[in-house]
Image (cartoon, rainbow, N blue to C red):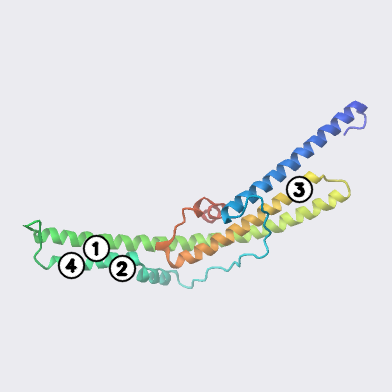
């Protein structure tokens, strides 16, 4: 407010500031409510509930001493690879015996081509599973780095909120500004929680990449951070 303003101008300016503060508070509360609603829907709670996080997901980095050894392990245990190899064995078996289909003799050349196709399919399956395993590994490592950054973001948000509350006590900040900082802290904590949950899933998926479905996680902030 400017000291040489008229009383009417001072009143109008104060009313404008008050209206702006009310709008900021409403926006902050609306943002928090939307975050709660989204979280409640995700975990199956009533929309009116306001759960408090009493325990955090334990974040433990992925421990892999030799990536190629892990890739070999996955290839040995993958049911997709087993099925592809069994198809090659079956085609090889059928190649060596006389085969009739619909009363017509199937020449050896056709059976040889079927064996080659089965071998190509098996090789392609192994390549895809190996690639999926490596991709999961690097995405998980990237997410671990992003998670460390999310913890720093929480510390910064906590400090900003602490300072803003002190400023409120001495009249240098408004309730709306404090609410805005609280919202930022809530958002930072939720992001870290989502990253921890996604990381836990990716660690499990790393051991069985053929069974992993990352389509739902792919649209989340955590997975986006992992890809950066």
Mark number, residue 179: 3
At mark 1, the secondary structure is helix
Q: Give the CA distance from mark 3 to mark 2.
A: 57 Å
Q: Residue at x 50, y 62 (%)?
A: 202
Callout in the foreground (3, 4): 3
At mark 4, the secondary structure is helix
Query: Which percent across, then down, holds residue 16?
Result: 81, 32
Can residue 145 be seen in this snapshot? no
Crowd rating for badge 1 (residues with CA inside 10 Å; few <14, some 14–19, many 20+): some
At mark 2, the secondary structure is helix
Q: Give the CA distance from mark 3 to mark 1.
A: 63 Å
- Which residue, given by chain and number where applicable, does mark 4 sit on? 92
Lower sequence index among marks 3 and 2: 2
Q: Give the CA distance from mark 2 to mark 1.
A: 12 Å
Q: Residue at x 49, y 71 (%)?
A: 64
Q: Give the CA distance from mark 2 to mark 4.
A: 15 Å
Query: Which percent across, then down, holds residue 214?
Result: 47, 56
At mark 3, the secondary structure is helix
Q: Give the CA distance from mark 3 to mark 4.
A: 71 Å
- Which residue, given by chain and number where applicable, does mark 2 sit on? 82
Q: Is residue 73 above or below residue 22?
A: below
Crowd rating for badge 2 (residues with CA inside 10 Å; few <14, some 14–19, many 20+): some
């Amino acid at each position: 407010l400017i000291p040489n303003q008229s009383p009417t101008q001072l009143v109008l300016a104060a009313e404008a500031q008050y209206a702006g503060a009310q709008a900021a508070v409403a926006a902050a509360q609306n943002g928090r409510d939307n975050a709660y609603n989204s979280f409640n829907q995700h975990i199956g709670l009533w929309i009116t509930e306001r759960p408090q996080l009493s325990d955090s997901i334990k974040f433990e980095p992925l421990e892999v001493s030799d990536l190629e050894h892990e890739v070999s392990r996955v290839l040995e245990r993958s049911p997709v690879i087993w099925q592809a190899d069994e198809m090659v064995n079956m085609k090889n078996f059928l190649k060596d015996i006389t085969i009739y289909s619909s009363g017509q003799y199937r020449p050896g050349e056709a059976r040889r081509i079927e064996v080659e196709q089965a071998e190509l399919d098996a090789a392609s399956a192994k390549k895809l599973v190996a690639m999926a395993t490596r991709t999961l590994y690097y995405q998980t490592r990237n997410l671990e780095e992003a998670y460390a950054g999310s913890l720093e973001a929480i510390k910064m948000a906590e400090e900003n909120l602490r300072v803003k509350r002190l400023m409120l006590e001495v009249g240098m900040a408004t309730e709306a500004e404090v609410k805005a900082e609280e919202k930022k802290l809530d958002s930072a904590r939720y992001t870290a929680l989502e990253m921890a949950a996604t990381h836990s899933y990716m660690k499990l998926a790393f051991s069985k990449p053929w069974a992993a479905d990352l389509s739902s996680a792919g649209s989340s902030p955590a997975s986006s951070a992992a890809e950066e």
